[in-house]
Image (cartoon, rainbow, N blue to C red):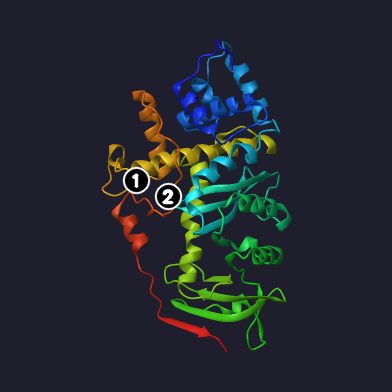
């Protein structure tokens, strides 16, 4: 770093802590990475122009800064394997030998790019394990496109964890189920209505013919799908939903199958919302290049991870009410952490050490009694039928 360059206390603290785990071939890459990360955390934005007030002074104009940032994010040497994965492994050390619920999903950006992510569902949100950006205008992708993301996520997991993966019906793929079986992962995938199921009696029917009436549940043990894949099928029609659910899983099915799959909605969908409208305003970014978007999203994932760490430990240490006025936690750990970082910078206080997250699953934030009542509401069915021929 140029000796004449003015650096902020936040930059120096981030560089000092992250250099424990991030060891790139070129030290300048880490310096640029940390500078941008600090700008994202302070601006709370994915828009490059919003970072300018928080960059180190280089005695250059705004356009020169933008060109330098564009060059950095287009650099193929800036990869998650070196800059994100080592930090995440440190944060997840306490998960060794424990259970982890992973969510596989996609999100489309500007009808031009498809973001594929595997996340850890945690605390009512998600922590990114691995992600990829494709120039692909649809949320539906083939197994060959997301297998590298699964493998990257697998390489980050602590030892001896019991993994359960949940995914939407767009991932109803034979290759995925075979891969999950080989890895000895449990899984629950929502099924399409036209999926053909061979029942234990040998009779074959589409899922649409096996859906129950409203308020009922049908559970089918030991079925086959896609010709030769053995699993179970659970179908339910909740009184307050527009359509019935059908979930195929390798776990023994029960009413809890739907609670398990339902954690996808409270995990990755709010996470995508944090990227977009509720957090970093990704959709306002003018970056339209797959490589640069991949780098930007990795930076957002790291910013989210560090802010979540700050927010969680505020609650863990009993300091939440300094910034959250709700009786119970009403702010996500991300929002709580971003506000805590602003407070520390304003008061000139140091960042806490980045300790591993303890193994737990904190309750979801609820900003109102109405939302808490909705989350805690019991779903009742008038009839449960188990077909175990």
Quarter in which the C terminus is drawn: bottom right
Q: Give whichever of discs 1 and 2 has the lower sequence position.
A: 1
Looking at the image, which residue is at 49% across and 20% down?
53
Quarter in which the N terminus is drawn: top right
Q: Which residue is mark 2?
A: 358
- Residue 4, horizontal then vertical, whole percent: 55, 10
Q: Secondary structure at mark 2?
A: loop
The quarter of the displayed image where residue 82 is located:
top right
Is 213 located above or below residue 129 in the figure? Answer: below
- Residue 185, horizontal then vertical, whole percent: 60, 64
**Residue 289 appears in the picture as rendered:** no
**Residue 33 appears in the picture as rendered:** yes
- Residue 388, horizontal then vertical, whole percent: 55, 86
Circle 1: is it few (<14), some (14-19), or many (20+) Cα within 10 Å?
A: few
Q: Name the residue nearer the viewer: 161 or 72.
A: 161
Q: From the image, state whether disc 1 or disc 2 is nearer to you.
A: 2
Is 255 located above or below residue 311 in the figure? Answer: below
Q: Residue furthest left?
A: 327
- Residue 26, horizontal then vertical, whole percent: 66, 26
Circle 2: is it few (<14), some (14-19), or many (20+) Cα within 10 Å?
A: some
Looking at the image, which residue is at 50% across and 84% down?
386
| Contact check, label 1 and label 2, Cβ < 8 Å | yes
Does residue 215 appear to the left or right of 164 in the view shown?
left
Looking at the image, which residue is at 64% across and 61% down?
171
Disc tally is 2
Q: Secondary structure at mark 1?
A: helix
Residue 368 bears which disc, if any? Answer: none
The quarter of the displayed image where residue 287 is located:
top right
Q: Name the residue nearer the viewer: 180 or 379.
A: 180
Q: Which residue is mark 1?
A: 316
Q: Name the residue nearer the viewer: 74 or 371.
A: 74
Distance from disc 1 to disc 2, alpha carbons, whole Å, reads: 10 Å
């Amino acid at each position: 770093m140029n000796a004449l360059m003015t650096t902020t206390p936040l930059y120096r603290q981030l560089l000092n802590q992250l250099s424990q785990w991030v060891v790139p071939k070129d030290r300048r890459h880490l310096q640029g990475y940390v500078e941008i990360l600090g700008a994202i955390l302070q601006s709370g934005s994915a828009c490059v122009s919003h970072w300018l007030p928080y960059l180190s002074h280089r005695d250059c104009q705004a356009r020169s800064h933008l060109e330098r940032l564009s060059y950095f994010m287009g650099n193929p040497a800036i990869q998650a394997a070196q800059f994100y994965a080592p930090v995440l492994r440190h944060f997840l050390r306490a998960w060794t030998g424990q259970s982890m619920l992973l969510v596989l999903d996609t999100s489309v950006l500007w009808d031009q790019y498809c973001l594929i992510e595997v996340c850890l569902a945690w605390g009512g949100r998600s922590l990114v394990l691995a992600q990829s950006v494709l120039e692909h205008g649809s949320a539906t992708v083939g197994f060959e496109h997301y297998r590298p993301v699964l493998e990257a996520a697998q390489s980050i997991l602590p030892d001896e964890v019991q993994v359960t993966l949940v995914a939407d019906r767009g991932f109803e793929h034979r290759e995925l189920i075979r891969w999950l079986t080989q890895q000895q992962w449990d899984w629950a995938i929502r099924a399409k209505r036209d999926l053909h199921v061979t029942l234990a009696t040998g009779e074959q029917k589409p899922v649409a013919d096996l859906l129950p009436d409203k308020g009922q549940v049908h559970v089918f043990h030991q079925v086959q799908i896609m010709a030769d894949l053995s699993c179970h099928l659970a179908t339910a029609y909740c009184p307050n939903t527009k359509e019935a659910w059908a979930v195929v899983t390798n776990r023994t099915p029960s009413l809890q199958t739907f609670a398990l799959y339902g954690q996808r909605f409270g995990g990755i969908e709010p996470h995508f919302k944090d990227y977009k409208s509720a957090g970093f305003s990704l959709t306002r970014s003018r970056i339209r290049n797959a490589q640069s978007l991949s780098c930007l999203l990795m930076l957002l994932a790291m910013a989210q991870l560090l802010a979540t760490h700050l927010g969680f430990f505020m609650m863990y240490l009993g300091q939440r009410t300094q910034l959250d006025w709700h009786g119970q936690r009403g702010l996500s750990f991300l929002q709580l952490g971003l506000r805590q970082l602003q407070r520390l910078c304003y008061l000139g206080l140091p960042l806490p050490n980045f300790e591993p997250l303890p193994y737990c699953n904190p309750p979801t934030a609820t900003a109102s009694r109405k939302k808490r009542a909705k989350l805690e509401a019991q779903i009742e069915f008038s009839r449960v039928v188990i077909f175990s021929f």
